[in-house]
Image (cartoon, helix red, strand yellow):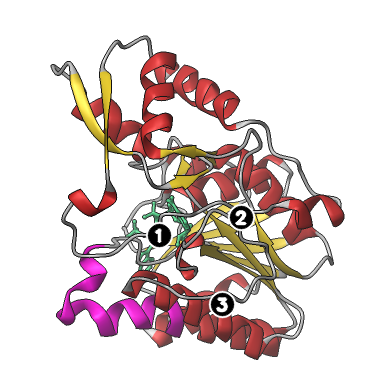
Amino acid sequence: MRYLVTGVTGQLGAEVAAKLLARGETVFGSGRKQEAPKELVAQPGFTYLAFDLADDTAVKTAFGAALPDAVIHCASWTAVDEAEKEENRDLVTKINAGSTRLLAGLCASHGAKLLYISTDYVFGGTGEKPYGADSEDFDPLNVYGATKLEGERAVRETLAEHFVVRVSWTFGKYGDNFVEKMLRVAQGRQEVSVVDDQFGTPTYTSDAASVICDIAESSEYGTYNLAASGGFVSRAGFAREIFRAAGSDVRVVPVKTADFKSPARRPLNSRFDCSKLGRHGFGPLPEWKDGLARYLAERKES
Ligand SMILES: NC(=O)c1ccc[n+]([C@@H]2O[C@H](COP(=O)([O-])OP(=O)(O)OC[C@H]3O[C@@H](n4cnc5c(N)ncnc54)[C@H](OP(=O)(O)O)[C@@H]3O)[C@@H](O)[C@H]2O)c1
């Protein structure tokens, strides 16, 4: 099959493209940067298309060049705090919602499948109950979450048969992430403060990408929540495991989200109920501690 994977210069898109190439698929990968990751460029079957999702003509031209059987739309404005700035709001909406609607329309007219990557931030994160894949308890707390929800709605309104796959708390070798941030801030320090009231499941992008490709290959249309196995953990608990697994004795001081001043509000409850995946024959993903250990080992080697 021919795939168009958007966001291959980002953390998740690069992994998705790599998995598809390993399966022998033809992949057109896109990003805004002039160059794609060298690991992808080196592989047969890969073509890089550099364009800005804010430019409708460029999106249509790229789609025409790729003529994909399926689009996996990973690209997104992901700078959550920057999205709150008044001067950025139109652009964030254009990229997260507008370009998604355009891609969905192109898929509809060309008979291509669409898998849209969304986020736990479409929910408000109250309570402790895990959100089900088909929960409509939407209540985004920030601009990023609201525009990703608009993206979800654009996909549902435009294509009767579609995939929406929500991920959260991802880490992987192609981008900056919470693991890197923790290892960075801990350098030369004996303790770091980390919030202990945000809960979720850290997920290795390599594991997520495999299941995303399985879903895109299938005809099991619908919305899925995708996270690693192994239960839920707070950000502080995740940080403790990062330091333990990395052999560091840095101490984690638990603090509250309310004590951290940031432009965007963030949900406290990012727990996903991923059982729908199993009911449709996907997953389960390996446990998050296992994913973290593999990530740290790979990181050491590179
Ligand atoms: N990371 C997480 O924990 C997390 C959590 C929940 C959901 N998600 C979702 O997962 C998906 C992938 O996120 P990620 O972690 O891979 O993010 P990322 O590393 O920040 O990558 C974002 C990608 O989007 C591309 N992009 C952004 N603006 C663009 C534009 N105007 N035109 C063209 N491309 C543009 C970037 O291209 P350039 O780099 O070339 O600019 C990059 O390839 C997103 O849909 C995100 O909402 C992520």
The numbered mark, 2 or 3, whose residue comes first in the sequence reads 2
Q: Is residue 259 left or right of residue 214?
A: left
In the displayed structure, 255 sits above or below 61; it is: above
Quarter of the picture containing the N terminus is bottom right
Q: Residue furthest front?
A: 127
- Residue pointed to by mark 2: 130
Label 2, label 3: how far apart the Cα atoms are: 19 Å
Magenta residues span 81-98
Of circles 3 and 1, which is in front?
Answer: 1
Q: Nearer the viewer, residue 243 or 259?
A: 259
Ligand 1's image quarter is bottom left
| Three-letter residue code for mark 2 | Pro
In the displayed structure, 18 sits above or below 168; it is: above
Q: Which mark is residue 267?
A: 1
In the structure shown, which secondary structural element does the residue marked by tag 1 occupy? loop
Quarter of the picture containing the C terminus is top left
Q: Which mark is residue 152?
A: 3
Q: Residue at x 29, y 61 (%)?
A: 79
| Three-letter residue code for mark 1 | Pro
The x, y position of residue 298, in whole percent, is: 48, 21
Q: Is mark 3 within 8 Å of ligand 1?
A: no
Magenta span includes 247: no
Locate residue 117: give its quadrant: bottom right
In the structure shown, which secondary structural element does the residue marked by tag 2 occupy? loop
Q: Nearer the viewer, residue 208 or 107?
A: 208
Label 3, label 1: how far apart the Cα atoms are: 18 Å
